[in-house]
Structure formats: structure tokens, C-alpha cells
Image (tube, rainbow, N blue to C red):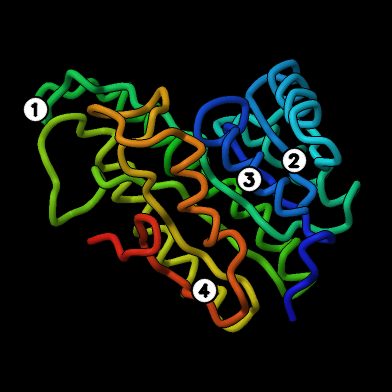
């Protein structure tokens, strides 16, 4: 059975700006206690303080979490579980886009490795820590932020590290969803589309706040909600 919204705890990676910050704010507005994370303590604490100031009564706290640092990931999730006794929602938003001017044959493999470390292994590390905590309560919602650029049916040759990392993230989403089937944990991915964020490719058609509102439903799914889905808004996204 789903816990009441007011008792749920959510953790959002890369929450100090853009889409991550908007998603954290939207979750807090729904009554969840939101743990906002960033690569530095200062950024996490500042963002939490700003969100509390912007919305009276919002329950927001900050934690340092660098998804490329395994010790940082373990510490953030362990501290969250110790302090709150649960973790109900994980939003894997932290990502990098480092190869906008590259093509497949011109790829810098160090950039490829750094991109995969954040966009794929970073999510993998976070889920590895989150799922055991969710299993203890028989409830969890995991939202992985993907991109239209990771669609295999629309794959292009530019920004190959970013594109391939998001395609791999989609595959990971489906694999994890299959593993936790029947355990009360629903895992899905969503693309914000052309939102006004630092990672945006092309002209933005919506604000980060608008994109967050369109994705929020996947973090608040009922028990019979979708699992292993790829979405843009409420519409399926081509794999």
C-alpha cells in the first residue's frame, strides 16, 4: 500500500539548478520531504535554504552527493535512510553533456568515459543504494531523466557520448524495472524535451518548471502505475 504523501521522502540528484531544482520544488509542494543533492555541500545547503524560503512549510534538506564518487553516493543514501527511516522516491536527474561538437568518429574517449560515468554509472550507483531501502518498506518510485536524443529509432551521429549514454540509461531503466517487479517499486524514465536548462539542445519550448510538472506524475504513481516505461509527458517515448 502506498504511504501517505506527507510521510514520503524523496531524493533528487543534481538538484541545485535547472530541472533538478524544479523537480525538487514540485515534489516538496506535494508534501514530500525532499533531500536536494549537489556535488558540493554549499550548493546543496544553499538550494535547500532557498526552496524553504520560497515556499512556506516546504520540507527540504540538503546533502552533498557526487554521482561519480561511490563513497559520496553511499554516504548520502545511508545518511538519508538513517535520518528519515525510509526513502520512497529517487529522481536521477544529475547528468552531463560534454560532446556537443563531436561526431562518432571524432569522439574523445575520455569525454565518452566521463559522460558514461555520470549519466549511466551514476544512476546505477544511486539505484544500488536506493533499492534496498525501498525494499524494506515495500514501496518505491524511481524516475530516471532521459532524453529524446537517446532514442534508438531517432539516433543521430552528433553528440555521440550523450546520445549513447541516454540510450544505455533507457536500457538500464527497463532492466531494473524487470528486477523489482512485484516488490512495490516502479521504475520509469522520462524526457523533459526542449526545456530551458543548461543541458538543453536546441531552442527551449518550455521552462524547467513546466517540464518538471509534466514529469512529476512518474514520481507519484499509484501502485498500479506503469513500470519500465519511457515517457515524454504522459506519452510513451520511442525506445
Q: In the depicted view, which residue is nearer to us: 126 or 219?
A: 219
- C-beta proximity under 8 Å, tags 3 and 4: no
**Can you identify the residue that label 2 sits on?**
35
Q: Nearer the viewer, mark 3 or mark 4?
A: 3
Mark 3 secondary-structure assignment: helix
**Can you identify the residue that label 4 sits on?**
179
Which residue is rendered at x = 39% and y = 56% of the image? 233
Lower position in the chain sequence, tag 2 or tag 4: 2
In this rendering, position of residue 173 left or right of residue 6 = left
Which residue is rendered at x = 49% and y = 70% of the image? 177
Disc on res. 65: none
Which residue is rendered at x = 74% and y = 40% of the image? 35
Q: Find residue 59 and report its horizontal and vertical position in percent.
A: 83, 42
Disc on res. 26: 3
In this rendering, position of residue 171 left or right of residue 60 = left
Q: CA distance from mark 1 to mark 3?
A: 41 Å
Lower position in the chain sequence, tag 3 or tag 4: 3
Which quadrant of the figure has residue 92?
A: top right
- C-beta proximity under 8 Å, tags 1 and 3: no
Mark 4 secondary-structure assignment: helix
**Can you identify the residue that label 1 sits on?**
105
Lower position in the chain sequence, tag 1 or tag 3: 3
State how many labels appear: 4
Amino acid at each position: 500500500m502506498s504511504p501517505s504523501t506527507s510521510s514520503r521522502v524523496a531524493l533528487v540528484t543534481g538538484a541545485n539548478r535547472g530541472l533538478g531544482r524544479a523537480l525538487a520544488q514540485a515534489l516538496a509542494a506535494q508534501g514530500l520531504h525532499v533531500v536536494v543533492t549537489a556535488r558540493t555541500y554549499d550548493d546543496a545547503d544553499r538550494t535547500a535554504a532557498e526552496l524553504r524560503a520560497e515556499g512556506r512549510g516546504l520540507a527540504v534538506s540538503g546533502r552533498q552527493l557526487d554521482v561519480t564518487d561511490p563513497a559520496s553516493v553511499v554516504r548520502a543514501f545511508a545518511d538519508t535512510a538513517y535520518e528519515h527511516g525510509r526513502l520512497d522516491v529517487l529522481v536521477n536527474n544529475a547528468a552531463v553533456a560534454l560532446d556537443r561538437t563531436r561526431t562518432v568518429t571524432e569522439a574523445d574517449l575520455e569525454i565518452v568515459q566521463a559522460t558514461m560515468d555520470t549519466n549511466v554509472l551514476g544512476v546505477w550507483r544511486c539505484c544500488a543504494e536506493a533499492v534496498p531501502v525501498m525494499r524494506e518498506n515495500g514501496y518505491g518510485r524511481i524516475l530516471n531523466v532521459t532524453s529524446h536524443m537517446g532514442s534508438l529509432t531517432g539516433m543521430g551521429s552528433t553528440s555521440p557520448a550523450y546520445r549513447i549514454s541516454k540510450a544505455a540509461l533507457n536500457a538500464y531503466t527497463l532492466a531494473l524495472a524487470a528486477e523489482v517487479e512485484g516488490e512495490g517499486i516502479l521504475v520509469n524514465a522520462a524526457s523533459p524535451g526542449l526545456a530551458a536548462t543548461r543541458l538543453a539542445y536546441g531552442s527551449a519550448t518550455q521552462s524547467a518548471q513546466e517540464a518538471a510538472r509534466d514529469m512529476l506524475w512518474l514520481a507519484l504513481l499509484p501502485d498500479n502505475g506503469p513500470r519500465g516505461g519511457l515517457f515524454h509527458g504522459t506519452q510513451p517515448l520511442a525506445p
